Image (spheres, grey):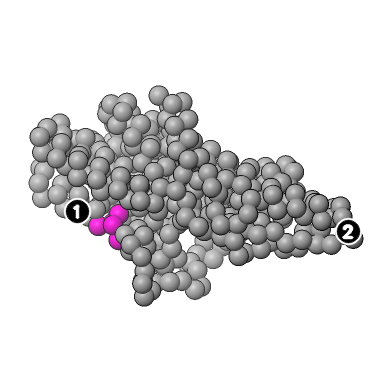
């Protein structure tokens, strides 16, 4: 099942982003890869925060010919997303749901509508699927009587070395510890160590106040893409939390996990807004967590009331699939430039025809350019 989920997720990502396959995303741009070409590979960095996702992808790409750099970063980004989808599916299957439900849970990550603006295929934004994966895994494990320490540590290390919001995952661990046995509390404490160490590193070595300039209010004429991405995930999460609190006295483990995911979606949305304002990349994690939580909520509701559960499932499917279909393919920000490999080939031809000059290449949105690249680097 996990292999099939990974392959299916990769195919979905390729389909969604095929028009931007051979592109260098304008943010973070090519300079990050160029630095690795100039100074060598790097496993991780601590500025502006502890992270290994961008350095590793850029380092691997820097070892390849220049013409392959666009495709390399895109495919590696797709691979990270697919692995995260697999991990989500495995975490859900451990809750006792059907293989179809767990597979759908992984698929909801790669179908997140708002990933179409600047996330799919963008090596600078793989931190968000990693955050979603780690949240689902840690929440699911922390609700077990005997959590799997190795699984929690792997998820914690992955998110610590990718996303500065990893500190928020201490919240579900702390909540689980309040009602845990001494043995379980010890496991949870060990699982928290990477998160604590990463948070301390970020506080000591990086700026933690967010962007200096950020958009905090919707601009005139903000489209449905932006307003729904900012407001809908948190609103749906809050609605399901209210239904659970008011309507159920006894909560199953699936419902508890769903409530934790809803709470984390709201918290991550608020933290992202505080640190970065309104930006499409910040919609991805709350939307995916709300979608996975909603899937578990409906799955549990159907076991209690099949008929009402079916109606709720239809409503949820409409709510999830209509935006996914509307914004399925990547938007112009990720696909408006000429193919990266084609630009490199044209530059090589011009180098062969005349005196040696420097060239600038265009990044994905069609307006940003790289620093000058000399003929000997082509």
Question: Image height check: is 213 above or below 253?
Answer: below
Image x and y of residue 91, in percent: 36, 33
- Give the mark toward the camera: 2 or 1: 2
Q: Quadrant of residue 147?
A: top left
Q: Who is closer to the viewer here, 144 or 180?
A: 144
Residue drawn where x is 40% and y is 66% of the image: 278
Residue drawn where x is 20% and y is 39% of the image: 313
Magenta span of residues:
231-235
Q: Quadrant of residue 365?
A: bottom right
Residue 206 visible in this rendered orientation of the protein: yes
Which residue is most to the right? 355
The residue at which mark 1 appears reads as 239
Residue drawn where x is 88% and y is 59% of the image: 354
Q: Who is closer to the viewer here, 122 or 264?
A: 122
Image x and y of residue 84, in percent: 45, 38
Image x and y of residue 120, in percent: 49, 48
Label whose residue precedes the other's in the sequence (2 or 1)? 1
Image x and y of residue 108, in percent: 36, 41
Residue 354's label in the rendered image is 2
Label 2: few (<14), some or many (≥20) within 10 Å?
A: few
Question: Image height check: is 13 above or below 150?
Answer: below
Q: Who is closer to the viewer here, 185 or 129?
A: 129
Which residue is most to the top? 1
Residue 311's label in the rendered image is none
Label 1: few (<14), some or many (≥20) within 10 Å?
A: few
Which quadrant is home to the N terminus? top left
Instruction: Say whether residue 232 is magenta.
Output: yes
> Principal SS element in the magenta part?
helix
Residue drawn where x is 32% and y is 26% of the image: 99
Q: Who is closer to the viewer here, 181 or 85?
A: 85
């Amino acid at each position: 099942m996990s292999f099939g989920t990974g392959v299916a997720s990769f195919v979905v990502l390729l389909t969604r982003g095929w028009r931007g396959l051979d592109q260098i995303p304008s943010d973070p741009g090519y300079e990050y890869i160029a630095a690795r070409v100039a100074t060598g590979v790097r496993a991780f960095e601590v500025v502006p925060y502890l992270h290994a996702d961008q350095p590793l992808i850029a380092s691997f790409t820097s070892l390849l010919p220049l013409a392959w750099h666009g495709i390399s970063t895109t495919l590696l980004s797709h691979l990270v997303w697919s692995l995260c989808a697999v991990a989500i599916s495995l975490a859900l299957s451990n809750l006792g749901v059907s293989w179809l439900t767990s597979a759908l849970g992984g698929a909801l990550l790669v179908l997140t509508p708002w990933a179409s603006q600047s996330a799919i295929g963008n090596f600078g934004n793989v931190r968000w699927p990693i955050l979603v994966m780690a949240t689902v895994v840690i929440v699911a494990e922390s609700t077990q009587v005997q959590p799997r320490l190795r699984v929690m540590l792997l998820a914690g290390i992955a998110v610590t070395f990718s996303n500065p919001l990893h500190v928020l995952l201490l919240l579900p661990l702390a909540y689980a510890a309040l009602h845990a046995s001494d043995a379980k509390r010890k496991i949870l404490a060990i699982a928290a160590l990477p998160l604590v160490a990463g948070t301390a590193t970020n506080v000591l070595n990086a700026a933690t106040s967010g962007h200096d300039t950020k958009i905090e209010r919707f601009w005139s004429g903000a489209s449905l893409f932006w307003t729904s991405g900012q407001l809908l995930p948190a609103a749906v999460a809050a609605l399901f939390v209210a239904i659970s609190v008011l309507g159920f006295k006894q909560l199953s483990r699936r419902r508890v996990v769903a409530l934790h995911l809803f709470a984390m979606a709201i918290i991550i949305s608020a933290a992202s807004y505080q640190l970065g304002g309104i930006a499409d990349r910040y919609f991805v994690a709350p939307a995916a967590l709300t979608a996975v939580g909603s899937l578990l909520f409906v799955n549990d509701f159907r076991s209690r009331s099949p008929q009402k559960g079916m109606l709720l499932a239809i409503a949820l499917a409409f709510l999830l699939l209509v935006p996914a279909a509307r914004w399925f393919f990547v938007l112009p920000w990720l696909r408006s430039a000429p193919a990266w490999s084609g630009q490199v080939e044209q530059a090589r031809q011009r180098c062969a025809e005349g005196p040696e000059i420097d060239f600038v290449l265009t990044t994905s949105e069609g307006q940003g350019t790289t620093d000058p690249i000399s003929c000997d680097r082509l």
